[in-house]
Image (cartoon, grey):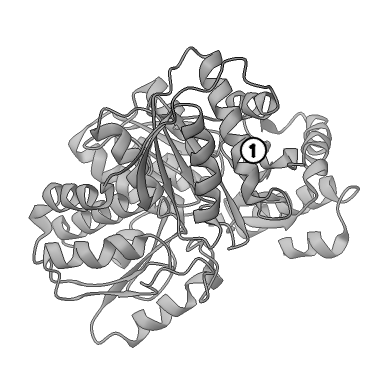
């Protein structure tokens, strides 16, 4: 039995051999096929990629066998980053694809990101796929589809090298943490093509067990090895890390300090707005007011959206935004690219910004005014309790008429001098919280109010982590 909680808001994801078995990929394939039929989409071909996790190959086998048994030709792009799947859908005649990955989750997780007509499925579409899994095919099986290998990796690298040819022979020092994932297949080749003599890599051998650290570079403890390399470097060096499928990017200054995803988005927004005044910039509900203020100060239009790569992409398309991003390190460029999240492309845009600037990264970061803002707290929570907790918090704060409540994604509570957010994680059994205040006392006040709201439903020892 497949655990229904793996069907999340913007992908399918769970613990392998606990929430679902590799052979259950056949049922998930059937659900996707049935959903395509319901939309009158003819799945003649399906691009399928996978990350380097130890179970990805077996999941690929079961998934693609079912697809081929239903007459679908599989375009096998091998072990790749998720953005390479998106790149393939935008640069070939193929419009539909599936990536087998659990992105930044630990090694025991795996899952599926699904695209129809070049767009990521999310929300009701994922729920409908779940509902359609057990519907039996009324149509007889047709001739089995083919399995065709396609070297998307090389095309992708060549495209990046061409788009960023002006960065050839870049001389500043860089260290890339490939995090033992598919970024390992891209970054060393890209460094060679662009002839970066002062760029190096760590954790650049594929290993689906992620032996060095969890594959989420936006978490401080997961970047300590990269930080030590920056400190040991002979000259000022910045660090750039990627997650398990390289759709996320996190950077560290010459001091080794991790840059919050929303502050990095503020830097990227300043750059985009210098070329496209009045452009719309989309960001997720977890982002700091410093980002909002920066966009306004540089004549942009800020647009807040629910967290999630599919949500950001949809919001960007609806508003014709040129840039989007999340606290979690997803960045989406639609000014000179296709508008999907790509950690490696975002890294190149950051390097381009530095190349054009008279400042180093630390100096650029210090130009963004910031309030007292916490990192993101992630507290363990049973999947079945998430919505109950969010509903309770909303009811708690609705009694206070001096607060403004936003519920597009969880509950964001704003006072005259602070804000606090609690939302359900869409990728793990956790709730996510973040706080900001104009001063330390206002920050503490909003944190205490949120703790009070949560206290009837969460243990004190867990809530103490908010301190």
Residue 181 drawn at (x, y percent): 42, 63
In this rendering, would 263 be left or right of 161?
Answer: right
In this rendering, would 150 be left or right of 158?
Answer: right
If the image is split into quadrants, where does the C terminus sit?
Answer: bottom right
Residue 63 drawn at (x, y percent): 53, 41
* Crowd band around label 1 with a 10 angstrom C-alpha radius: few (<14), some (14–19), many (20+): many
Q: Is residue 463 above or below residue 452?
A: below
Q: Is residue 236 above or below residue 30?
A: below
Front residue of 286/195: it is: 195
Q: Secondary structure at mark 1?
A: loop
Front residue of 417/61: it is: 61
Front residue of 311/364: it is: 311
Front residue of 343/326: it is: 343
Which residue is at 41% across, 20% downward? Answer: 318
Please identify the quarter of the rendering in which residue 365 is found: bottom left
Residue 339 drawn at (x, y percent): 33, 35
If the image is split into quadrants, where does the N terminus sit?
Answer: top right
Q: Is residue 18 above or below residue 287?
A: below
Please identify the quarter of the rendering in which residue 62 is found: top right
Q: Is residue 342 visible?
A: no
Q: Is residue 34 visible?
A: yes
Residue 359 drawn at (x, y percent): 21, 63
Q: Which residue is label 1 attached to?
A: 8
């Amino acid at each position: 039995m497949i655990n229904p909680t793996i069907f999340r808001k913007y992908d399918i994801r769970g613990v392998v051999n606990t929430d679902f078995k590799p052979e259950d990929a056949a049922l998930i394939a059937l659900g996707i096929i049935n959903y395509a039929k319901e939309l009158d989409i003819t799945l003649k071909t399906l691009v399928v990629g996978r990350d380097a996790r130890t179970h990805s190959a077996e999941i690929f086998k079961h998934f693609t066998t079912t697809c081929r048994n239903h007459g679908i030709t599989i375009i096998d792009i091998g072990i790749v980053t998720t953005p390479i799947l998106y790149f393939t859908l935008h640069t070939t005649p193929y419009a539909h694809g599936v990536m087998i990955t659990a992105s930044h989750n630990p090694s025991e997780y795996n899952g599926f990101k699904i695209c129809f007509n070049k767009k990521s499925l999310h929300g009701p579409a994922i729920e409908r796929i779940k509902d359609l899994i057990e519907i039996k095919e009324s149509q007889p099986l047709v001739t089995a589809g083919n399995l065709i290998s396609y070297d998307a990796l090389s095309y992708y690298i060549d495209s990046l090298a061409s788009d960023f040819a002006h960065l050839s022979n870049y001389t500043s020092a860089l260290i890339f943490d490939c995090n033992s994932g598919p970024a390992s297949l891209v970054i060393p080749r890209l460094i060679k093509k662009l002839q970066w003599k002062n760029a190096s890599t760590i954790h650049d051998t594929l290993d689906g067990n992620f032996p060095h650290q969890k594959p989420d570079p936006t978490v401080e403890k997961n970047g300590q090895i990269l930080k030590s390399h920056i400190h040991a470097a002979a000259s000022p060096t910045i660090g750039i890390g990627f997650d398990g499928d390289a759709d996320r990017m996190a950077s560290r200054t010459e001091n080794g300090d991790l840059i919050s995803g929303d502050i990095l988005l503020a830097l990227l927004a300043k750059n985009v707005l210098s070329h496209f005044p009045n452009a719309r910039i989309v960001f997720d509900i977890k982002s700091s007011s410093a980002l909002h203020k920066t966009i306004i100060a540089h004549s942009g239009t800020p647009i807040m959206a629910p967290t999630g790569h599919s949500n950001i992409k949809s919001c960007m398309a609806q508003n014709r935004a040129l840039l989007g991003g999340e606290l979690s390190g997803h960045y989406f460029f639609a000014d000179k690219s296709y508008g999907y999240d790509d950690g490696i492309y975002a890294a190149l845009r950051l390097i381009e910004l530095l190349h054009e600037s008279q400042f180093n990264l630390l100096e650029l970061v210090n130009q963004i005014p910031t309030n007292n803002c916490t990192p993101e707290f992630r507290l363990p929570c049973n999947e079945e309790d998430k919505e109950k907790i969010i509903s309770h918090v909303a009811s708690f704060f609705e009694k206070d008429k001096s607060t403004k409540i936003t519920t597009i994604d969880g509950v964001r509570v704003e006072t005259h001098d602070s804000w606090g957010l609690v939302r359900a994680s869409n990728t793990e059994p956790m709730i996510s919280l973040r706080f900001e205040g104009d001063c330390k006392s206002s920050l503490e006040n909003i944190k205490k109010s949120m703790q009070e709201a949560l206290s009837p439903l969460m243990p004190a020892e867990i809530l103490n982590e908010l301190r």
